[in-house]
Amino acid sequence: MDNTANRWRTIDIVIASVLGVAFGVIFWAWGLLWNGPADAIPLPGRAVLYGVWLVPAVLGALIIRKPGAAFFTLTFAALVSVALGSSWGWTLVVQGPLEAAAAELAFAAFGYRNFRLPVALLAGTLAGLAASIYDVFIWYPGTAWGSFRLPYILITAVSSLLVAGLGSVALTRALAGTGVLDRFPAGRERATV
């Protein structure tokens, strides 16, 4: 890929930042749900909700289509949620970039040339695997593999595949259909995401 195609434009930085701020606020609110009404659903079952936290990585990459977009967008969202007072506090400064790097790997594996559904699904799944593996060692260290850890990892991966992967493709298509992404390849290639 041509180096000039990989350079971030000002609009790329602005859109990634706007997505990061928007999802940082969503993360903060989602944390209230996770620790509030959803707390009635026992873990590992509650992990069906997990994919929401990984959407900005996949969505950012699908819209911006440049190296680092997944990493920047999700990391920025995690930092915004920390600034808003997320219940997980500063641990997100580590966890957000780990999840973002996992999603970024999917796009990097295809040379930042393929932004279609299968790659988005892979990115969501990899981010979910990174998130859940981090969780079982950091947040749930005393749990059993068979009854908690493995189901938690699998449920999180499926949630991430569907919500972050498929959901981000649907969001990108919806946004492209409005014309707001016309300055991005995702907007100009509406039918190919």
Image (tube, rainbow, N blue to C red):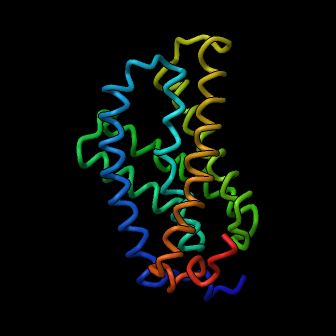
Q: Position of residue 147 (x, y in %)?
A: 63, 11
Vertical relation: 193 (above or below) 170: below
All told, the count of numbered labels is 0
Vertical relation: 134 (above or below) 3: above
**Of 181 and 104, which appears nearest the observer?**
181
Query: Residue at position x 75%, y 61% from top?
Result: 109
Residue at the extreme left: 84
Vertical relation: 7 (above or below) 18: below
Task: Determine the image quadrant of residue 30.
Answer: top left
Vertical relation: 26 (above or below) 37: below
Query: Residue at position x 52%, y 11% from top?
Result: 142
Q: Position of residue 74 (x, y in %)?
A: 46, 55
Q: Position of residue 111 (x, y in %)?
A: 74, 70
**Of 185 and 92, which appears nearest the observer?**
185
Which of the image's four quarters has the C terminus?
Answer: bottom right
Indicate left or right for 183 with 23 as reference: right
Task: Determine the image quadrant of residue 129.
Answer: top right
Query: Residue at position x 70%, y 60% from top?
Result: 117
Q: Where is residue 77 in the image (x, y as percent from the top left)?
A: 38, 54
Query: Residue at position x 57%, y 60% from top?
Result: 170
